[in-house]
Amino acid sequence: MSVATGPAPERTPSEAKRRKPGLVGWVVNRLGLDDTMEDQYNRVVPFHASNYVYCLGGIALVLFVILAATGIMLAVYYQPTPDAAYQSVLDISTQVQFGWWIRSIHRWSAGAMVLLVFLHMLRVFFTGAYKKPRELNWLTGVALLLITMAFGFTGYLLPWDQKAYWATKVGTDIAGSVPFIGHFLLVSLRGGEQISAATLGRFFDLHVLVLPGIILVLLLGHFFMIRRHGISGRL
Amino acid sequence: MTRSSFLKWLIGIVGAVSVAGILYPVLRFLKPPPAVSGAIGQVVNVGALSLFPAGQLTAVIINDKPAAVQNLNGKYAVYSLICTHLGCVNRTDGDTFRCPCHGSEFSPTGTVTHGPAKLPLPTYRSQTQNGALLVGPIDLSRAAYPAWYKGEFT
């Protein structure tokens, strides 16, 4: 079997420079990501954006990551049935080691994320960052705000205490007041006319399966568009 | 040591401490606590069947909790003696139960015949083996017992 012989093609200086050592270099080299990575690393943050109000979206993302991690951990012990839900939450807070810590982080991060997403929206609004060509990113951002609030609403029911029960009663009653489709929304959310085991199951499903899937897709789109558009100009 | 290698070490140490600080509580969290692992009491041999005469309740202690063995013509059942009202220990009165604190009374099958208790007495899982009575974990499925009551058995 003959192999093509002859002098190996010479590397250009830039090609040689680009070869990175180590594990990261190995992966990047296999995937041919040199140009992409270099492009990502060489972004310059404009001077007007070196301001804390431009960090609000990023902080919201950090909170989301924290919420995902602590939420996965809480799901280890939480039981979404009316008989066991409240007791399992009590067990997390009183029996499980560091359970109170994980649950408190989840709870406080949840509140903070709603606040941070809202403040981020105000920043985008008042710096006019929603204008052409960034309208689509504004729309995904609005969707992300709504998803965040849906996370909060569904998560509120899960401890299955009195406050959770009545807050969900009021919230689903409001959904029921929508013209024409109100009753459909109400029974779809509650899984029946009344709040029951079906409601808890549905809210748990939304909170840990449906909403995380939707928010991941929206976040990817949101960040892709930030990269595509770059940071908006100064006022 | 050069300044850059010193800084690299510093970053590495700070990073390792940070990761350890997160991993430690996470691993401790994943270790199941005794109360949540589902093991409510162990199987206890309360003695030969001849210790429990028919037609009356015989008081026993199971996992440090008061209980009573009932012998209905060779059919054995074990009831918790902890009153479902506020947790006093019921007295046995013939084949019925009576709470000395607030006067709750329970039928031979553990159901409430007189308030203020609302919930039936739970039973222990039990079976006979080689002429002895083995008592397993308590069966709280007879009613939706409140958290404080479940705590009596963990």
Image (cartoon, coloured by chain):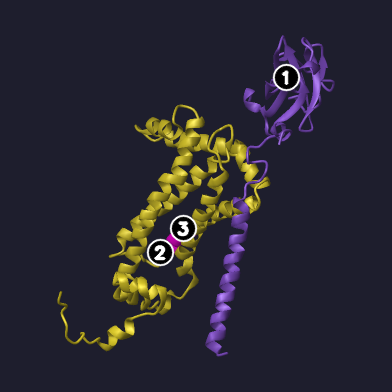
Q: Are marks 2 and 3 in contact (CB under 8 Å)?
A: no
Mark 2 or 3, closer to the camera: 3
Residue A211 in the image: state x and y as whole percent. 42, 47
Q: Which chain contains the residue that carries disc 2?
A: A
- Chain letter, disc 3 residue: A
Q: Amino acid at mark 2?
A: Val
Residue type highlighted by circle 3: Val
Residue found at the far right of this picture: B100
Q: Residues within 10 Å of mark 1 (few under 14, many from 20)?
A: few
Judged from the image, the secondary structure of the residue bearing numbered disc 2 is helix
Nearest the eye: B97 or A123 = B97
Q: CA distance from mark 2 to mark 3?
A: 11 Å
In the image, are marks 2 and 3 on the same chain? yes
Q: Which residues are magenta?
A: A116-126
| Picture coordinates of residue B97, whole percent (x, y) | 78, 16
**Element assignment for label 3:** helix
Quadrant location, the C terminus of chain B: top right
Chain A: its colour in the image is yellow
Above-or-below relation of A99 to A37: above
User: Would you name the residue on which mark 3 appears?
Assistant: A117
Decide if residue A149 is in sight here.
yes
Q: Are discs 2 and 1 located on one and the same chain?
A: no
The chain coloured purple in the image: B
The residue labelled by disc 2 is A124
